Amino acid sequence: MEATNTDEITIKGRSVGTGVAIGKAVILSSESKTVAPTSIKKSTVKKHKQRFLKAKESLIDELQLMADELNDTGSVEIIDTQKQIILDAEIERSVFEIIEEKQLSVDFAIYQTYCQFIERLKESGSELFRQRIVDLEDIRDRFIDLVCDQKKKKSVKKGALIVAREISPTDLVSYYEDGAIGLVMEKGGVTSHAAIIAKSLGIPCIVSAEKATKEVLNNKTIVLDAAEGTLILNPSRKTISRYRKKVEEAARRKKKRPDSFETADGFPLKITANIEFEPELPRIKEHGAEGIGLLRTESLLFGHKIRKSTEEQLAFYSAILEGSSGPVTIRLFDIGGDKTSRRTVKEANPFLGWRGIRLLLDEKELLQNQLKAIVRTAAKYPGRIRILVPMVSVIHEVNEIKDELESARKELKAEGIELTESIPIGLMVEVPSVALSAYSFAKKVDFLSVGTNDLTQYTMAVDRGNERICNLFQHYHPSVLQLIKMTVEGADKAGVDVSVCGELAGDEIGAACLIGMGIQELSMVPESIPAISELLHSKTKEELEQFASSALELGSTEELEQLFEDWKN
Ligand code: PEP
Ligand code: MG
């Protein structure tokens, strides 16, 4: 936290998407519920079980209502996951067991059951699983309120800017419906569920905003700039008017979308979208992306709505292809820890462990199911699909995945299924070893795609989900740029294209450096496209090249930020 003048205070957080919000702060308390065990009479056991079933029904109805209202955003997918949790047979069995066998009240039975599930998630060692804990806590508390008849709907006024330690996706959606315009969270990574939902709803959001709930005063006007990752308390009139201009600017940009992307001197640029959920598809069209540069597929394996089989995946990929135009780069499952295996794998360093391609090559059935679903989709949509392999670190993995793809094709052919000639296969450049030996990797494949989120994590030795050290997560640090430059050189020598699909591509400084370094395609969240395309359109190819070459000479992120400010204006 830093004081910018005697009154104004700036709290730094991590950006989730873009956008500016100016509104009245609403601080949400985050006291966790506790319920003590209460004995019940045997004769009331049935009643307690019925109260559980009734509350379950109400919760499902509530969620259905929400899903109906939000049927064109990524929220639907997450609400669906919550429904699956509520309907889970194991939860019901455990609640009934506590009521019947221990003769304890239904509120405690729910409390204990959910707490046990939460503990299991905490122990899983998986960052993504830990981020789902807030969903379970939220469902638990709403369940308890319902069985105790304390259905108090929390609400906020129109124009509220929510400041919370952490918030559940359902609460966020409900505040959004009330008219909330921004979200600040102390906890949570940029990949937390609430962050995904905020982005999907187009609400400016920052996470990892340390001490925000302590520093912000309720009902006071605050300014949130999601792209900058800043929250300004006690903003002066001048500051408010500066940010108002930004809000107007964003609205103006949204209206005037270019027909194609190019630099000031007409050098064509390829800008594609990163998506994960079907409801995000309309956003791609809205912002004019020329295809999907990164389709994350992990949501197929999340939570309780698992879609592992080839048929289930086929339906998902077909829906994505139907709902978009241009090329679609499907990334193979980038999962880690024990998420898809029945075996419990506890790792001291999950980010350095059994993740991405490392896991897929050990879990052949999972890999083959996905490859077959992709190969079959490619046959239906010829020339549109590319396969992207995550977390590669050695050449051996590249050879193996190519063999696996070949064997999936052979098996399908033997089953009499019509196939296309070949599907381009590419690697994510996320581990420094791949960037440093880019030529050796590039000559084995059809394209490279730089995942700057992980490349930054592994270059700067900074856990991307750890809010304590998030200031060290500097994705345009010159060292990261050097690795990208090496990647471009290696790929050029091998004659293959390089794109960037990490968050750096959707950052102004990053995008300018990347195009200046010779990157052919930038893939980003659709919301980032207007600002990035406008910046790139304001500069010539040569100006971008000069900027990138000066950036590569620098030694720190701060120097680069200064260089950018001087260059941009
Ligand atoms: C990346 O690492 O930059 C990337 C795009 O992949 P993810 O964020 O899904 O790990
Ligand atoms: Mg990655």
Image: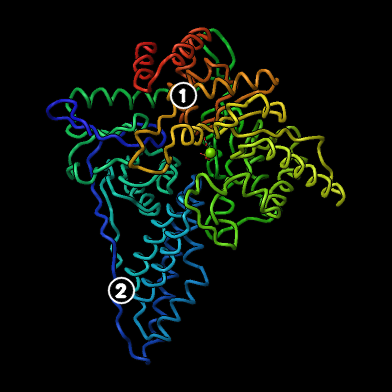
Residue type at mark 2 is Cys
In the picture, residue 147 is in which quadrant? Answer: bottom left
Label 2 or label 1, whichever comes before in sequence order: 2
Q: Is residue 147 above or below residue 375?
A: below
Q: Residue at x 34, y 75 (%)?
A: 107
Q: Is residue 254 left or right of residue 439?
A: left
Query: In the image shown, does 223 or 294 lie closer to the viewer?
Result: 294
Answer few, some or many: residues within 10 Å of disc 1's Cα (few below 14, many 20 plus, some between 14 and 19): many
What is the x, y in percent for residue 245? 30, 22
Which residue is identified by label 1?
479
Query: In the image shown, does 129 or 58 lie closer to the viewer?
Result: 129
Q: Residue at x 45, y 70 (%)?
A: 57
Is label 1's Cβ within 8 Å of ligand 1?
Answer: no
Answer few, some or many: residues within 10 Å of disc 2's Cα (few below 14, many 20 plus, some between 14 and 19): few
Q: Is residue 73 left or right of residue 521?
A: left
Query: In the image shown, does 329 or 242 lie closer to the viewer?
Result: 329
What is the x, y in percent for residue 412? 82, 48
Whether residue 22 can be seen here? no
Which residue is identified by label 2?
148
